[in-house]
Amino acid sequence: MREMDIYQVDAFTDVLFGGNPAGVMPDATGLSEDIMQKIAREMALSETAFIIDTRGRVPVADRADFEVRFFTPWNEVDLCGHATIGSFWLLAELGVIRLGEGETRVFQKTKAGTLPVDILGGCEGKPARVMMTQIVPTIVARPTHEEVVELEGILGAPKGCVTGFRALKGAVPQVVSTGLPDLIVPVVSREALLSMRPNMAALIDFCNARKIMSVHAFSLETLDPAATVHCRDFSPAVGVPEESATGTASGATGSYLVFNRLVEVREPVTKIVCEQGHILKRPSTIHVEVESRGGRVSGVRVGGSAVTAMRGKMQVP
């Protein structure tokens, strides 16, 4: 047995017990995939990140400073937004990444590709915000009207609150990927959104049949006037019935809003604020920046702040 450091970091919040908690093992060198999965199951959080410092150990052409792997209690996933924010916040807090003036850029190697992460320095060399670059967003599928009607029933939503959005704003649900395929679902009101009580077993079947990571529903009605959308995310197919903050799906949502002109598009960067997690009593604030030129989306960054909630030692075989 050996002792290894492990942390819980609450991401997309600046207060303890807010945001979305992620497990983070800052030095996972030598761990097998099987052990990583068992640790994630033991942590029982939506995702746990395992970090390997690759600086000076890989060809410069690879650009990766850190390799990061993400595990839910059920399985490994290619990318995780809130665990990325938590991981690089912690690395900066621990001094593993030294911050300069402005943003400090590092690169993480994930199963979704090698992606930039920018860390904004704050007071006394501590991090103030972490922004992760995601894969250029694409619309990968458009559910049929019959599938949307079926989904509305599965979500336990008031009849017409999803199907009626098209008449209201001219947009329909779409599967958008910035690294993971998320079904983005517009809802006519925050009241309808908060009333949803999904049939999780049916939702697992719906997502698995379409290879969807999550169903991310949003309303343009927000609690905070500074926010753009109020969101809920359901990911039971990967063992997470509902999540309090979802970085990858927020990137997909921001892209969806720009694709469908549901927000004022400002080139070169449209800034969007997603609020989430209030129904779970873990309010979260997720900042999204969608880059576009000539009406074409060219990139997306997602980020926020974080709070380290727990530090501990784990016995690892």
Image (cartoon, grey):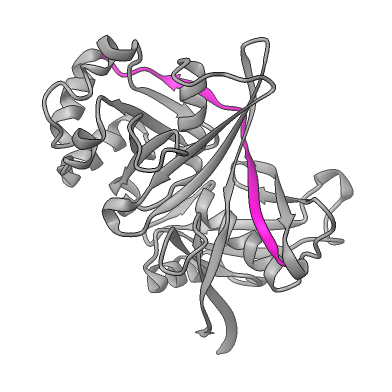
Q: Is the magenta stretch mostly helix, strand or loop?
A: strand
* Residue 189 spot, x, y in % from top left: 24, 29
Q: Quadrant of the N terminus?
A: bottom right
Tell me if residue 143 is in the magenta stretch. Answer: yes
| Nearer to the camera, 297 or 74 | 297
Q: Is residue 151 left or right of 66 when viewed as pictured?
A: left
Tell me if residue 290 is in the magenta stretch. Answer: no
* Residue 226 spot, x, y in % from top left: 47, 39
* Residue 282 spot, x, y in % from top left: 36, 59
Q: Is residue 37 left or right of 59 when viewed as pictured?
A: left
Q: Which residue is drawn at 45% across and 40% down?
A: 274
| Number of numbered labels in the structure image | 0
Residue 275 lies in what quarter of the image? top left
Classify 314 as above or below 40.
below
Q: Residue at x 59, y 82 (%)?
A: 4
Farthest residue to the front: give it.
Answer: 225
Bounds of the magenta span? 126-144
Q: Is residue 151 left or right of 140 when viewed as pictured?
A: left
Q: Can residue 96 be seen in this view?
A: no
| Nearer to the camera, 299 or 144 | 299
Q: Residue at x 32, y 32 (%)?
A: 221
* Residue 90 spot, x, y in % from top left: 63, 67
Q: Is residue 255 left or right of 29 when viewed as pictured?
A: left
Q: Residue at x 83, y 55 (%)?
A: 58
Classify 99 as above or below 258.
below
Q: Is residue 17 visible?
A: yes
